[in-house]
Amino acid sequence: MTSPFQPRQVPGSTPAAAGAGRRGVPALPTPPKGWPVGSYPTYAEAQRAVDYLSEQQFPVQQVTIVGVDLMQVERVTGRLTWPKVLGGGVLSGAWLGLFIGLVLGFFSPNPWSALVTGLVAGVFFGLITSAVPYAMARGTRDFSSTMQLVAGRYDVLCDPQNAEKARDLLARLAI
């Protein structure tokens, strides 16, 4: 059986798409192609499987890890209050102001004045840019959070030419 992939082609891309990217036209995303050789509940286990294939001198450039059953997970990290919002605004503004003041200080006859001016302006800017959005939300989102994209499982796909060999190697791996 011969491989549908060209040499140095990434599984999941088409030859036309690979060439189109070099000519300046952006390549459109395509679904991954290949035969499933393993399925794992975590990304770390799928990564370990590919590492094992690499250690066995398997051509891992023919392997793709695909997250399946994607979920967007928002983890709430804490409650937002006016003091937290304003404190965060002051800190982020102060860092920005210090940076701008430092840069301006290189070109100023009085660098300390530029640094202090940048700091004060940054604190003011940080207060405004944090307080206005929080006030406009009017209590509809009084918490901070982080977003993650998580998969229900991770499938390892392989070029059909070597899929059977990959499956046999992974059968020896006890994860």
Image (tube, grey):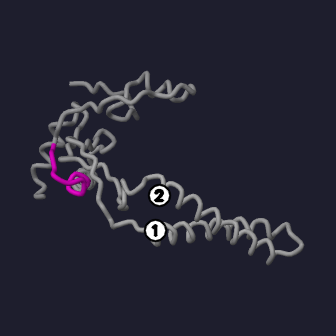
The residue pinned by badge 1 equals 82
Report whether 105 appears left or right of 21: right
Residues in magenta? 38-47
User: Which residue is pictured at 50% across the width and 54% down the height?
Assistant: 133
- The mark tally for this picture is 2
Question: Residue 123 location, x and y as percent?
Answer: 63, 69
Q: Place residue 127 in its image quadrant.
A: bottom right
User: Which residue is pictured at 85% across the width and 66% down the height?
Assistant: 107
Residue 155, numbered label: none
The residue pinned by badge 2 equals 134
User: Which residue is pictured at 29% across the width and 24% down the height?
Assistant: 4
Q: Alpha-carbon distance for marks 2 and 1?
A: 8 Å
Question: Residue 158 location, x and y as percent?
Answer: 24, 37
Q: Secondary structure at mark 1?
A: helix
Q: Give the farthest residue toward the bottom.
A: 112
**Camera-nearest residue between 56 and 103:** 103
User: Which residue is pictured at 22% across the width and 36% down the height?
Assistant: 162
Q: Secondary structure at mark 2?
A: helix
> Which amino acid is tagged 2?
Tyr
Q: Place residue 13 in its image quadrant.
A: top left
Q: Are marks 2 and 1 in contact (CB under 8 Å)?
A: yes
**Camera-nearest residue between 41 and 115:** 115
Q: Is residue 40 magenta?
A: yes
Q: Place residue 173 in its image quadrant.
A: bottom left
Q: Quadrant of the C terminus?
A: bottom left
